[in-house]
Amino acid sequence: MEVKVLGAAREVGRSAFQINCDGANLLLDYGVMFGNPRGSPPTYPLHVKPRDIDSVIITHAHLDHSGCVPSLFVSGNCNVYATPPTFDLSKLLIKDMLKIEKNSHSFDIPELNNMMQHAKQIQFKEKIVRGDTKFELRSSGHVLGGSTVLVESDKKKLFYTGDINLRGSRMLPPADLDIGDVDLLITESTYSQEKQTPRSKSEHDFLEFANEVMDRKGILFVPSFSVERSQEIACVLENANFKHRVIMDGMALKVNEIILKHPEYLKEPEIFKDVLDKVVAIDEHRQRKNALSEPCVVISPAGMLVGGNAVYYLQQLAFDDKNGIALVSYQGEGTPGKKLLDTGKVSTRGKEMHVTAQVKQFQFSGHADRDSLFDMIKNIKGNPKVLTVHGDNNSCIKFAEEIHEKFGLDAIAPKIDDTVSI
């Protein structure tokens, strides 16, 4: 079994791993990495010829894992495997990316449509055979339909975490780690050097902030990723019997429709339906203006304040000290959200302006943190070789060193274009 690292090597973004084994050529993810600062050209994984791949496996819909798959359909095609919600969400996010970043990519809507024509929907634990190799998806706990990948061939087994959450969330159960012995582990390292705030404390502090803003007759703006983070925040508010209106806007509404199509992937689908019944959905500008007439919580993409309806809400709410802004998503370098956190300023109408609304950040990550990742490795059976990926340079290298020190395993932080054999 041979693994070629095409992306996500000592970096967060453009995840892609080519697996060659016993007559099968698999591609695990093929994502895009957005420019830094956002708006500069995107970066793709190393090029792979479609004829050299017989199966593409998308772990989940986030663009750093799915966004480059349509490029394989510019001059060829191959079968693409994922869960039904992953295909629905990937199509939505890739279409939005192509709309926002018009003419920035090597592919467009025709290639996306071609990708969807080659979509092979599979369920968790459904084994697919390719030559003498088989693969299957397991629940990752990260986003709806998100998966890890098991590949077995010639008495060797590979486990790829993609993005993984060992603790689950209000919406999703924890990742499924009942995977038996493993010979090669490819693990994300995103938060391998950080202990995250316990979810219960994050929820408590967020709710306390929301109630403080309501008490002073303000509006709490929650810029949030449209896939799952927006819905998770709505669930937190509903679970606490929050007494004020909760408004949801933007692409999160389309994501809600997709989630409702696939209730079997949720931890408690009936509770989620109740949450959405109580949320006020806004999809036109007149409603937007009227919604801000009384204290409420507004949940709207984009999570890093890059475009979307978040720009409108920011302009309306950021300059009144009664209001609050709760940042609940990761804030990438070079984004308006990161600038707001670091400087207290935003650029609006061509000017740099100081924000007078109270700004706080809360951890609601869908990734495993340091303790969870070590627990995962401790509980994986066998004596696997470990590749640490999908983290910044320091996180990947340090995590590999720590894995070797703690568990005695052969662990490396591969570089782009490295090939690893087992």
Image (cartoon, rainbow, N blue to C red):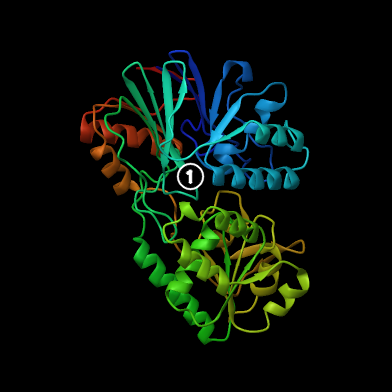
Query: Farthest top residue?
Result: 23
Q: Which residue is drawn at 64% across and 47% down?
A: 93
Residue 203 image offset from top left, x and y in percent: 41, 68
Q: Is residue 253 above or below residue 19?
A: below
Q: Position of residue 141 (x, y in %)?
A: 41, 49
Q: Quadrant of residue 259?
A: bottom right
Residue 48, given in percent of the width and then of the height, sits at 60, 20
Percent from the top left, x then y, of residue 403?
27, 34
From the viewer's perspective, is 290 left or right of 224?
A: right
166 relative to 211, above or below = above
Q: Which residue is drawn at 52% across and 34% down?
A: 15
Q: Can residue 14 be seen in this view?
A: no
| Residue nearest the viewer, comparing 421 with 216 | 421
On the question of residue 298 being in view, the answer is: yes
Which of the image's four quarters has the C terminus?
Answer: top left
Amino acid type at mark 1: Gly
The reply, left or right, for residue 287 in relation to residue 137 is right
Residue 56 vs residue 329, the one in the foreground: 56
The secondary structure type at the circle numbered 1 is loop
Please tell me how many numbered marks the rendered image carries.
1
Residue that numbered label 1 is attached to:
146
318 left or right of 65? Answer: right
Quarter of the figure with the N terminus: top left
- Taking the spot 40% from the left edge, 37% from the top edge, the residue there is 125
Circle 1 crowding by C-alpha within 10 Å: few under 14, some 14–19, many from 20: many
- 253 vs 17: above or below: below
Kindly identify the residue that appears in the image at 37 percent across and 27 percent down: 158
